[in-house]
Image (cartoon, helix red, strand yellow):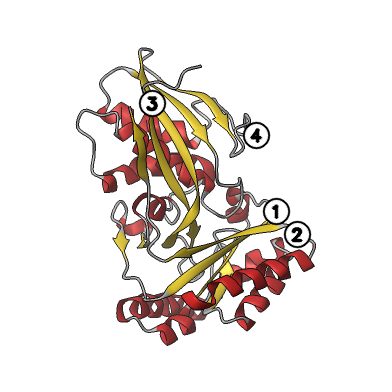
Amino acid sequence: MSNTGFVTAFAPASIGNLGVGFDMLGLAIAGAGDRVLARKIDSGTVAIREVREINGEIHPHLSSNADENTASIAANSLWKEAGDGSGVELILHKGVPLQSGMGSSGASAVAAAVAVNALLDDPHPMEDLLVHALAGEKFASGGLHADNVAPSLIGGLVLCPQVLLPKMIALPIPAEISSVLLHPELQINTADSRSRLADSYSMDQWLAQQGYLAGFIAACAQNDIGLLAECLRDETIEPQRAESVPCFPAIKEAAMKSGALGCSLSGSGPSIFALCPESEAANLAIEMEQACRKMGYECQSWISPLDAPGARIESQA
C-alpha cells in the first residue's frame, strides 16, 4: 500500500523517575524512539493501518485496534478536539522495546500526537500536546504521570509533578554530564509493577526522598556535580523493584565502581541508567554491559547528552 500523504513524527525513548524523582522527573535519550506516520482519510475516525517492529516486520504483540493502542488514543484525543471532521490513518513503527522501562508507550503516544498535530490547519504549540499524549500513556500504565511523555515531547531533563500538570519545567542541564541507559533482555509490565508498590511510607522515608529530590534540582541549577552525586538516590521505590531485575545489583555495582555519579532503574525497569562525566560514558557503558552479560542476560546500551532533543517532524507531505 502507498504511504503517500503521510506526515512522519519521531519521539525519543526516555528515563522515567530518574531514580530520585518518582513520577516527577524524566530524561530524554538519544538514539532510540518510535515513529508514527499520519494522514487524513475520509472515514471520520482515527484508525491504525499497521504496527511494525524496528526490523519492518508486523509487530506480533501490539494491537492495531484504535481503542487499545497508546498512539491512536493520543491521536484521537487531539483530533476530537481540533480536527476538521475527517479521519486519520496511522502507521506505527516501534523502535523502543516493550515493557523495557524506556517509555515505550509514552514514545508512541507522543509521536502520534506530534504527527497528527502537523495535520491541523493551525497546529498547537508543542507543550499543548502533553494532555493528549497523557491520554495514551494513562491507558498503558494505569496512572496519570508524565515522567516519560514530557521528556519525550520536549526533550532534555524535565520536572513534571502531577500536581502541576499540564505544566512541565525544563531543568537546567549540568555541564559535561551524560546518561548511559542499558536495557537487559527482560520485560516488566509497568502497571503490574506499580500495583505492587507500598501504599504508605514513614515520615523519615518521605523526608529523606524529598530532600534528595530538592538537592538534585538545586544541583542542576547550580551545576554542582558533587551535590548531584550525593542526591541521585532512590531509597523508597528502587528497593521494592530491584528484586524484579536480577542483574541490577551487579550492574549498579559495576557502574558505581566505574565512575557513575548515580545508578538506578529506569522507570519500573528492567532498564538501568547511570549518570556520569561525558569522558567516562563510553567505558561506563562497556562495564555495565559486561556486568549484565556475566549475569546471563543479553543487552544493549545508549549514551546520551542530558539535553537530548524531544519529538520532531521528520517528513511532511
| Image x and y of residue 198, in percent | 59, 63
Near mark 2 (Cα within 10 A), the count class, few <14, some 14-19 or many ≥20, is some
Of label 2 and label 3, which has the lower sequence position?
3
The quadrant holding residue 131 is: top left
Q: Which residue is mark 1?
A: 186
Observer-side mark, 4 or 2, equals 2
Looking at this view, name the residue that lies furthest to the bottom: 226
- Disc on res. 61: 4
The quadrant of the picture occupied by the C terminus is: top left
Q: CA distance from mark 1 to mark 3?
A: 34 Å
Query: The residue tagged with tag 3: helix, strand or loop?
Result: loop
Q: Which residue is mark 3?
A: 6
Observer-side mark, 1 or 2, equals 2
Q: How many marks?
A: 4
| Image x and y of residue 133, in percent | 39, 42
Tell me the amino acid under the disc marked 4: His
